[in-house]
């Protein structure tokens, strides 16, 4: 049991260190020169604000527990795709970058607070922010990219990041040291969100 806790603590420590380093790359996201599926796949991963938010949704869903571990991330992906369609169609949405930055801050605060939100409320909570993330993905699609392939790419990347967060969170909530590190990660994520908000 001690080995499991040590392994979980090591994983979460690496996650915390990685999250702490990401704000320095805050403006590195956008097009990577690829079109279609690959470009969509890369966009959430190479955008630190997107990446942190996606992983945190997974962490938060595991912290809440029960059906939230799949309903909360699923809600995010579905609403994000709808937001992406708005962006692809050129339908404007105000304060998109601000909404993305605030999502990192709010998700971090929720994780640090370690309160078991009702599942329905958590779904609404992440769904609101998913609209902004999706809209950004849609509007930042490379001009020559195939929209359907691009959408599949960013949806799969988002789901993958949710899974990383959910698995890490699941390991964390099952031991005391991991639960504390999860709250610490939430605090650092909230600080990252504050940085992003200040950069908008």
Image (cartoon, grey):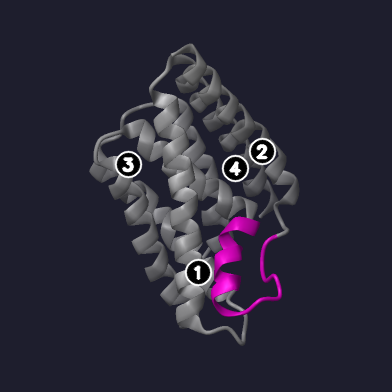
Image location (x, y in percent) of residue 54: 49, 50
Mark 2 or mark 3, earlier in chain: 2
Q: Mark 1 points at which residue?
A: 153
Q: Is residue 32 above or below residue 104?
A: below
On residue 186, which mark appears?
none
Kindly check if marks 4 and 1 are in contact, taking CB atoms under 8 A apart as contact: no
Q: Mark 3 points at which residue?
A: 69
Q: Which residue is drawn at 32% across and 55% down?
A: 75
Kindly check if marks 1 and 3 are in contact, taking CB atoms under 8 A apart as contact: no
Image location (x, y in percent) of residue 71: 28, 49
Quick one: which residue is furthest to the bottom in this view? 144
Mark 1 or mark 3, earlier in chain: 3
Quarter where residue 76 is shown: bottom left
Q: Name the residue under label 4.
A: 193
Image location (x, y in percent) of residue 42: 60, 64
Q: In this picture, which residue range is highlighted in magenta?
A: 29-46
Query: Circle 2 sits in a helix, a strand or a loop, which is it?
Result: helix
Classify the position of the N terminus by image quarter. Answer: top left
Left or right, residue 27 beside residue 188: right
């Amino acid at each position: 049991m001690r080995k499991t806790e040590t392994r979980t603590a090591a994983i979460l420590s690496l996650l915390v260190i990685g999250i702490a380093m990401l704000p320095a790359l805050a403006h590195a996201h956008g097009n990577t020169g690829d079109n279609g599926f690959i470009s969509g796949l890369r966009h959430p991963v190479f955008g630190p604000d997107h990446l942190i938010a996606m992983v945190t949704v997974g962490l938060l869903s595991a912290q809440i527990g029960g059906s939230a571990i799949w309903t909360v991330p699923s809600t995010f992906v579905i609403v994000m795709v709808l937001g992406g369609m708005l962006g692809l169609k050129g339908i404007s949405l105000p304060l998109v970058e601000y909404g993305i930055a605030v999502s990192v801050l709010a998700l971090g605060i929720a994780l640090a607070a370690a309160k078991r939100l009702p599942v329905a409320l958590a779904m609404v909570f992440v769904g609101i922010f998913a609209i902004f993330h999706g809209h950004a993905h849609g509007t930042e699609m490379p001009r020559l990219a195939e929209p359907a392939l691009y959408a599949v790419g960013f949806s799969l990347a988002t789901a993958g990041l949710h899974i990383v967060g959910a698995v890490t969170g699941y390991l964390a909530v099952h031991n005391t040291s991991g639960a504390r590190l999860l709250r610490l990660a939430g605090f650092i994520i909230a600080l990252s969100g504050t940085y992003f908000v200040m950069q908008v």
